[in-house]
Image (cartoon, rainbow, N blue to C red):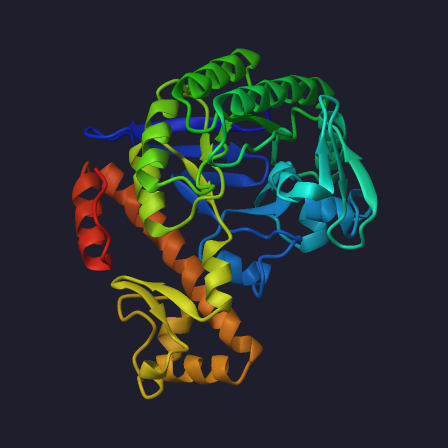
């Protein structure tokens, strides 16, 4: 009855990495996969056609932002998010929980829900798990998230435990409120901070609720990477093999590979688009700040090993000129490259899993990129 189905194709012989396919109402998604973020019903600077050209099969939008502007009811009138933004492939919407809790003094948390003031105009709003599901049902994404509380790092054990209990209560309430189960898959979100016993408890209790997929939240929020990897490795031990596993808000090349090794299937992050707009790009040899003076007369592509539209047609010198001139095309070209880089990276990771050489691939990639290996 679930809207999506996860098909496990192959398991890596030396790690927890998995090769799979998520079947959705808007197409199949090979995993592991990186999902570009389109917070306000658009991946910044990109058209849907350009996203398809670089191989994106699923993108994200943000419930909090779309609820405030233009409003979920308007999007429902337009025929849902797919029609509204002219995207006929899969969409995932987060619950808006992270954005609400990031408002700090502008919000008040109770067992019933969260009262907050809009960052746009200061207007007062109240979100409950049921209201969030109502909004996400109106948006119509293929995969939707439960409302949760993302505890900060560091945080005391008692606070994180209370936060976890709230997240579990809200997950149960959201699941009851969700009626569109044949068209939209609702994921439960695992919280518990950096406390292993809480992560285990939260995971097992969510699994008992039987969601079609599970998200790992509350990581990459300031904790050291070795702690993040340790908690991630521990958490996936208790996650079902027949459901997709989504690590929320993680998207640097090293974190993607390390996450795959620990059994994660889905990733998202604003990092590639955000740094692109500031003139920084990923390359096979590490990050490159193309707006720097060193590239003023550099007529090489951003990455000589890259086959994206930007690298096939434009030089570092030209792109630097665009950034220095504040031309919109600069951000567009850098964004195309960065998203292509991560989508191609995950394609290469999938091939490495298929050929049982993931650890070898990681070692070569890290050495060339300039990363130190964590495991």
Across and down, in percent, residue 282 comes to 35, 62
Residue 347 at least partly seen: no
Q: Residue furthest bottom?
A: 297
For the C terminus, which image quadrant? top left
For the N terminus, which image quadrant? top right
Residue 27 at least partly seen: yes
Residue 336 vs residue 165, the one in the foreground: 165
Q: Residue furthest top?
A: 208
Is 202 rendered above or below residue 12? above
Q: Is residue 87 left or right of residue 348?
A: right
Residue 149 vs residue 254, the one in the foreground: 149
Q: Is residue 135 left or right of residue 372?
A: right
Residue 142 vs residue 136, the one in the foreground: 136
- Residue located at (38% from left, 75% from top): 290
Q: Quadrant of residue 369?
A: bottom left
Is 136 rendered above or below residue 80? above
Across and down, in percent, residue 112 comes to 75, 23
Across and down, in percent, residue 188 comes to 56, 25
Q: Is residue 274 left or right of residue 320?
A: right
Is 302 rendered above or below residue 63? below
- Residue located at (47% from left, 71% from top): 333
């Amino acid at each position: 009855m679930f809207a999506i189905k996860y098909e496990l194709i192959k398991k890596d012989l030396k790690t927890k990495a998995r090769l799979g396919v998520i079947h959705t109402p808007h197409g199949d998604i090979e995993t592991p996969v990186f999902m570009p973020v389109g917070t306000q019903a658009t991946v910044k600077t990109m058209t849907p056609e350009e996203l398809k050209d670089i191989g994106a099969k699923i993108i994200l939008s943000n419930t909090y932002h779309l609820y405030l502007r233009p409003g979920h009811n308007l999007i429902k009138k337009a025929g849902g998010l797919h029609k509204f933004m002219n995207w006929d492939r899969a969409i995932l919407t987060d619950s808006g929980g992270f954005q609400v809790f990031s408002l700090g003094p502008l919000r008040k948390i109770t067992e019933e829900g969260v009262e907050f003031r809009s960052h746009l105009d200061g207007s007062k709003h109240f979100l409950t798990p049921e209201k969030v599901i109502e909004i996400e049902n109106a948006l119509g994404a293929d995969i939707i998230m439960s409302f949760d509380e993302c505890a900060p790092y560091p945080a005391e054990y008692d606070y994180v435990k209370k936060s976890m209990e709230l997240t579990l209560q809200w997950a149960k309430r959201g699941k009851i409120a969700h009626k569109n189960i044949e068209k939209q898959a609702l994921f439960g979100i695992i919280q518990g901070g950096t406390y292993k016993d809480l992560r285990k408890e939260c995971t097992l209790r969510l699994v008992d609720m039987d969601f079609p997929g599970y998200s790992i939240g509350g990581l990459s929020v300031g904790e050291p990477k070795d702690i993040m990897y340790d908690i991630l490795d521990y958490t996936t031990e208790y996650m079902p093999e027949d459901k997709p596993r989504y690590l929320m808000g993680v998207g640097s090349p090293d974190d993607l590979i390390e996450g795959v090794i620990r059994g994660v299937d889905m990733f998202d992050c604003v990092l590639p688009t955000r740094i692109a707009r500031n003139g920084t790009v990923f390359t096979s040899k590490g990050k490159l700040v193309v707006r720097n003076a060193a590239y003023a007369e550099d007529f090489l592509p951003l990455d000589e090993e890259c086959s994206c539209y930007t690298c096939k047609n434009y030089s570092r010198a030209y792109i630097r000129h665009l950034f220095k001139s504040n031309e919109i095309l600069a951000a567009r070209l850098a964004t195309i490259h960065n998203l292509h880089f991560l989508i191609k990276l995950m394609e290469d990771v999938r091939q490495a899993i298929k050929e049982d050489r993931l650890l070898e691939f990681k070692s070569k990639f890290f050495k060339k990129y300039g990363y130190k290996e964590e495991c």
